[in-house]
Image: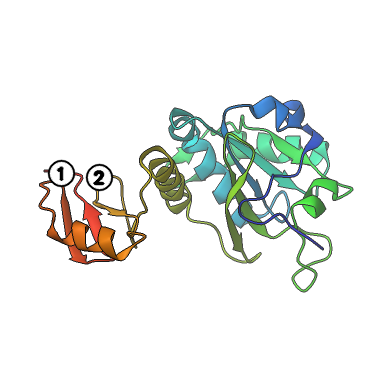
Amino acid sequence: MSMPLIGDDAPSFTAVTTAGEINFPRDYKDKWVILFSHPADFTPVCTTEFMTFASMQDEFREMNCELIGLSIDSIYAHIAWLRTIKEKIDYKGMKDVEITFPVIADLKMEVAKKFGMLQPNASDTQAVRAVFMIDPKAKVRAILYYPLSNGRNMDEIKRLLQALQKSDSEGIATPANWQPGDDVIIPPPGSCGAAKERMEAAEETKYCLDWFMCFKKQRV
């Protein structure tokens, strides 16, 4: 079993989904994509995840990001499960939730195998909770893997997307526990001269803890 790594091109595929056939990456040109797998339909952890993702879908779209789900179930199982969520499930104040992002039917495991979503020591027939964050150039930028038993933190997935987009747009890095609005890290200097110059330069929008560790203020 192989899987794409960070920086690799995301594998291309055509798949039947609950929103019709999709061709990836052609149908998602110039967009970020979060492709995530779940073990099975009609399971409680997956239900909470799908409802939470659906409740945040507009927030992801505001960040130019689309969601795509996947499990090794049939299109009919997907449809029945999504209808049940909408008609019967009330969870943490979320009810009447309609899942409109596509959910891939992957009975032959073709897409799951391309992305390494099957972990044989966990299950031969269920995809683990994988998350692939794919940029507008169809490059894999981040990979998260969770076991079958534990649900994902959707706020962390959103935070990571925000961090990736900020790093891309400003050429910076983000520190541990970074949240939008926090100070960011300036890449380390590449020479002794640049390090010395950085430490001696006084800038209102920048501060250094040492030559290799300088921050850009987000609020001056």
Q: Quadrant of residue 211?
A: bottom left
Left or right of residue 69: residue 31: left
Q: Is residue 41 above or below residue 78?
A: below
Q: Residue at x 46, y 40 (%)?
A: 94
Q: Is residue 65 above or below residue 220?
A: above
Q: CA distance from mark 1 to mark 2?
A: 8 Å
Q: Residue at x 37, y 60 (%)?
A: 190
The answer to whether marks 1 and 2 mark residues whose Cβ atoms lie closer than 8 Å is yes
Q: Is residue 213 above or below residue 83?
A: below
Q: Residues within 10 Å of mark 1 (few under 14, many from 20)?
A: few
Left or right of residue 160: residue 126: right
Q: Quadrant of the N terminus?
A: bottom right
Q: Quadrant of the C terminus?
A: top left
92 or 167: nearer the viewer = 167
Q: Residue at x 24, y 59 (%)?
A: 214
Residue 148's spot in the image, x, y percent? 66, 64
Q: Residue at x 31, y 51 (%)?
A: 179
Q: Give the structural element (helix, strand or loop) at label 1.
A: loop
Residue 166 - label: none
Left or right of residue 87: residue 214: left
Please give the residue where the numbered disc 1 appears in the rendered image. 219
Q: Residues within 10 Å of mark 2 (few under 14, many from 20)?
A: few
Name of the residue lying farthest toward the right: 108
Q: At label 2, which amino acid type do we have?
A: Gly
Residue 9's spot in the image, x, y percent? 69, 45
113 or 103: nearer the viewer = 113
Residue 181 - label: 2
